[in-house]
Image: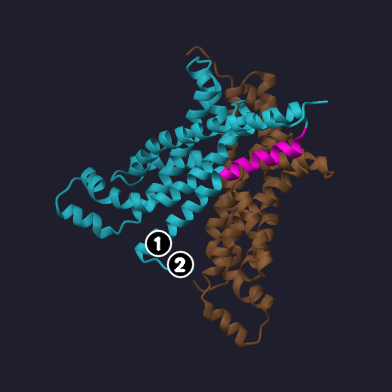
Chain colours: A cyan, B brown
Amino acid sequence: MGRSFGIGEFLFLLKAIPWTLLLSLGALVGGGIVGLVIAILRIAPSRPLQWLATGYIELFQGTPVLMQLFVTYYGLAVLFNLQVDAWPAVLLAFTLYSGAFLGEIWRGSIQAIPRPQWEAAECLSLSFPAQLWYVILPQAARISIPPTVGFAVQLIKNTSIAAIIGFVELTRAGQLMTNTTFKPMIVYPIVAALYFILCWPLSLLAQTLERRIDATLGIKTHY
Amino acid sequence: MNYVFQFNVVWDHLPELLQGALLTIQLSATAMALGLCLAIVCAYGKSVGPRPVRWVVAAYVELIRNTPFLVQIFIFYFSLPVIGVRLTANTAALVAMTVNLGAYASEIVRAGIEAIPYGQVEAARALGLKRLQIFRFIIIFPALKTVFPALASQFILLMLSSSVVSTISAVELTAITNSLASTTFRSFEFYFVATGLYLAMALGFRAGLSAIYWAVFQRGRAP
């Protein structure tokens, strides 16, 4: 018979949360950089660059995260002859994945800025990078905050997939504790509850911010 | 780089991969149909149901949307047998996918319902239609039409996340790929090809859903 599920086992789960958060945060920062590049390429005044960015987004939004993890994990091993740990491979995979989603979200935010803003900036004879940097991005950033927070929730949940290749975060810790205690009816609901505690406040925040921005932009909602 | 790619091993096993892809398609298509029905019921309950029903639906939606799909699968497959509900791997996968999709899709459908101008409901009421008749004949069809693009991308996300059910030994594409990769030691090649298959399936589903949209909402109507 296995161990019982006591305070020690619960603490083991808690100690895995920082890894979930660290992975999410790392992927959000790395993916933010990739995503900004992708978003700008998508609206750049050059067809090939637009196609490149579109291809990147299609590739990462059209394949499962789990497959991206496997390909990155084994790809690093065979392409660069690197026997990597799970951590860098997982971080790289989630960075590339977030880049595609954030890129698409931010492209939407940039394109939500009315056309005359671009034209006005052009009349001031600003270059394309200057138009983007001084006029468009500061406004687009505001619009993009709620969906970005929403994506952070999706990212935190998806980092659970890293458990499958053996990276010890919250879900993997849950698996390990189930294997030692044989109490899946206790462990997995607790794991789910811990994720809920991490994600729900962010979901609510995203909703609140969205309503506030809709209000300032004068968009009518049902609330 | 001194690794020699051997994709011919993958081609030898292509029939098995396609077999797995078939199960992925079956699981996803079934979950899409069932999940949409669940979503419509939930959206109806949340829009016009009495307060307790609305609370139950809201709790269901928030719980599912703020916990990882992987943990939900574990609960359906590993936790439920403890209280006597024993599901086979494929059934557990299908149930988890349906329940997951139902929550996301119900919010999408509800957005569509809220977008129906209220005057139409009042007009229907003036004609003496009952509440369920109003929902059935006036509301749901245009609501689904409005939100169809959002539903379609949610459906495709579901198909992609179905790769995660490989962890409970439902032998869909990812599970087959895993076992072939570990018996042939050609991990990178297998995962690379499987990723391509997923991409093809995502494009295929998108085309199929567009065809459904055309057949259901566009055919025989004035443009």
**Residue A135 relative to residue B192: left or right:** left
Disc marking residue A214:
1
Disc marking residue A221:
2
Q: Is residue A54 above or below residue A217?
A: above
Tell me which residue sits at (67%, 40%) in the image. A190
Query: Label 2: how many residues lie within 10 Å, few (<14), some (14-19) or many (20+)?
Result: few
Magenta residues, dominant SS class: helix
The N terminus of chain A: image quadrant = top right
> Do we see residue A179 in this rendering?
yes
Tell me which residue sits at (79%, 26%) in the image. A2
**Residue A4 relative to residue A208: left or right:** right
Q: Position of residue A171 (x, y in %)?
A: 63, 34
Q: Amino acid at mark 2?
A: Thr
Which range is magenta? A183-197
Q: Residue furthest front?
A: A7
Q: Is residue A41 magenta?
A: no
Q: Position of residue B215 (x, y in %)?
A: 60, 63
Q: Chain of mark 1?
A: A
